[in-house]
Amino acid sequence: MAKTKQKKGGLGIFFAVTAIIAALIAATFSSIKNNLNLGLDLRGGFEILYEVSPLNEGADVDMTAVINSISKRVNVLGVSEPQIVVEGDNRVRVQLAGVEDPASARSMIGTTANLTFRDVDDNELSDSSILVEGGASLAYQDGKPIVSLKIADADKFSEITSSIAAKTNGNNIMIIWLDWEEGDTYTEERTKAAAGEEPKYISAASVNSAISGDCIIEGNFTETEARTLANLINSGSLPVKLTEISSNVVSAQYGNDALHKTGIAGAVGILAIMVFMLFKYRLPGIVSCVMLAAYIWAIFGLYSLMGAVFTLSGIGALVLGIGMTVDANIINYERIRQELYKGRSIPAAVAEGQKLSFSAVFDAQFTTLIAALIMYIWGNGAVKGFATMLILTVVMTLVLNVGFSKWLLSLIVGSGIADNKPEWFGVKQDQIPDISKGESQFYTGTHQFDYSGKAKYLIRTSLVIFAVALIMSCVSLAGGKGFFNLGIDFSSGTKLTITSEEPVTIDAVSAEMDELGYSGFSYQSSGENSVYAITKQALTTEDLTKIKEAFTEIYGVEPGDNVVTPVVGRDLVRNAVILTIVAWIAMMAYVTFRYEWDYALGCIVALVHDVAMVLAVFSIMRFEVNTELISVLLTIIGYSINNSIVVFDRVREMMASGKKNMKEADYREIVNKSMDATIKMSLYSTVTTMLPVIFLLLMGSRAIFTFIFAMFVGLIAGTFSSIFIAPSVWVWARTHIKPKDKKKTKKKEVKEELDEYTFKGVNA
């Protein structure tokens, strides 16, 4: 009786835990949603990468002082959760999501704001120290916006204005400069102003008598310009010069549209995974759905608590991570089924299956963690955001799959409700031997196939694709276009995102750009209401302002812009190569440590194949190669090695119980048996990962189409390389390299025999 109650208690705990999870999700949903820190690609805003240089050549740069000055200016803008990050020795990246006026914010942050008072001969009369700290404010005179300045040292200011007023011949003018540089002259700037150009000084006022009180700055200001100027003066001068070398501005409407479409696509993809798991695994599928709900809640909750920035690429990583976390369930559940086919009871099969699946799950997830850590340490921008999500994915997968989901399944099985019900695990009664009658296993759930023998066909297909890509790249190179269609991330240039509330066409945008006098742009559709205009030139701030003002007037939405200078493009190429090589080396080292070097060789060849396949498809289809592709390649590396490890884990298991002095046919037989045992794991894992990717391709934002398409190609390549290429390379290494080691061993044994005979009298 006590045992029965204990069993029922396990089932009760399962339902109680499920109810608690549902209650926690319902209770915290609004709080998590409201506290999520959305990136600029989801709610608009801008990101600028500055190169920091000292105002005086040879002087040292205090990056802490730079960050403090920028933070002070950002606070004036009222932006919540700004991201200000130092990159390298002399760069700082500023991300302001949700900022309403990017142009004013840009001016506010990048301007040195060194205010000086000068005479007509450009002699400095005073700097900003004469003003009350924080005493500049927006005011109005005759209905026009002006800037009011509170004077701290009235006596000095009276002395200065008195000396100016005493000058004759129209030279009684005091000029207020912002960021005066050596070579700037009032005479030259006054000539520009007379010709209708904007002078570098901000005010030039006649002084007829000494001024002992406050003063004003008047000019042809708009209210926004006057307020920005007052804020700049109050924020103080920057201790350095900031040169903008890369920028990305996203309109709020474009960001909201991307979030809406991608969110729906992700939700549909998650629902499809749940349906698949329920259909394939019955009772364990229910546990998987509970785990998946807990996983999504935990990921969003952690992001909210950490204050991490949630980006479009982060959503891609989340959806991919969901497929990969279910992959751990699949490995576990397939192992349980295989134990049931041997005739084990439900409790024994679950216990043994969970035990045997642990090493494959752990090794697969840990290799993905290696790739994610490398992305986080050396990546930046979207790559770092993607890596953050991937790290959380791996950690939560290990916690929820290795711990939580196994515990939930054990509770149900321990209750006895599933005893003698193998169909609840997707296994039929007539597939299980009756051990009590002396029957042995007769069903394996696999279909014998010569995977090792058929690998040559896949290898030939891959070689054909690589050859086509090489030929088309050479043709493209001959036409002056290059091997790849490099995005501005790598080649430098400017990308404008023209967005409208109504449908907009490439022809309309192109015509407007020609009318503005800008040629050399290429155009791409980015959905019904958006068009990309791309040029290989890094446009100046003045050009950007002119273009954006024109399109804002036409379509009612300010265009987004992404500007990358050549120096950034070169750095991105270098970092991309370094990231990939470091990831390969780290993964090979880990696989060698956990298995042997020939297993690692099989994995690395498969990885090279997968990366080459994605690049070949992009070369053939002329898709844009950008920084987000690096995130995809590193993820594909992690995914591909996951599947390879699942196969090699079974190969290692069979090798441990195999015979010695094996020949090539024996190794091929082990590979085929291992593939038979793991093929469902590989294919089902691909399905659960591909489902959300497919829905993101069909329904998601065009902003991440290239990102998701690369994922799609890489997943297919990774699946087939882990099934055919990695094991084939392992067989080749075993039959062509390992025998040399055996010969050495044999010689050593002979030598030991001779030594034995030499000292046989002593030994006797």
Image (tube, rainbow, N blue to C red):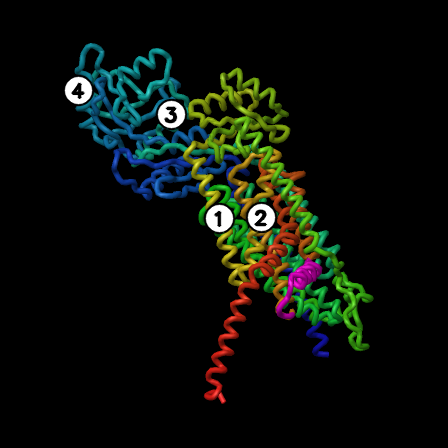
- Tell me which amino acid carries mark 4: Ser
Image depth: mark 4 or mark 1 in front: 1
Q: Position of residue 49 (x, y in %)?
A: 42, 36
Q: Give the total number of marks visible in the rendering.
A: 4
Give the image location of residue 646, x and y in percent. Answer: 62, 59
Residue that carries the numbered disc 3 in the rendered image: 226
Tell me the SS state at disc 2: helix
Mark 4 or 2, nearer chain start: 4
> Which of pointers 4 and 2 indicates the residue nearer the eye?
2
Residue type, mark 1 in image? Ile
Are there few (<14), some (14-19), or many (20+) residues within 10 Å of tag 1?
few
User: Could you say where residue 475 lies in the image, as x and y percent from the top left?
Assistant: 58, 30
Q: Main secondary structure of the magenta part?
A: helix
Q: Which residues are magenta?
A: 659-678
Q: Residues within 10 Å of mark 4 (few under 14, many from 20)?
A: some
**Amino acid on which the number 2 mark rests in the picture:** Ile
The reply to whether dot 1 and dot 3 touch (C-beta < 8 Å) is no
Q: Nearer the viewer, mark 1 or mark 3?
A: 1
Residue pointed to by mark 2: 636
Q: CA distance from mark 4 to mark 2?
A: 72 Å
Residue bearing the label numbered 4 = 163
Q: Residue at x 64, y 55 (%)?
A: 326
Residue for badge 1: 581
Residue 745 locus on image (x, y percent): 52, 70
| Of 641 and 723, the residue lying toward us | 723
Q: CA distance from mark 3 to mark 2?
A: 51 Å
Viewer-closest of 651 and 456 = 456
Q: What's the residue at 29%, 24% (across, down)? A: 177
Residue 246 vertical placement versus 335 (above, below): above
The answer to if 665 sits in the magenta stretch is yes
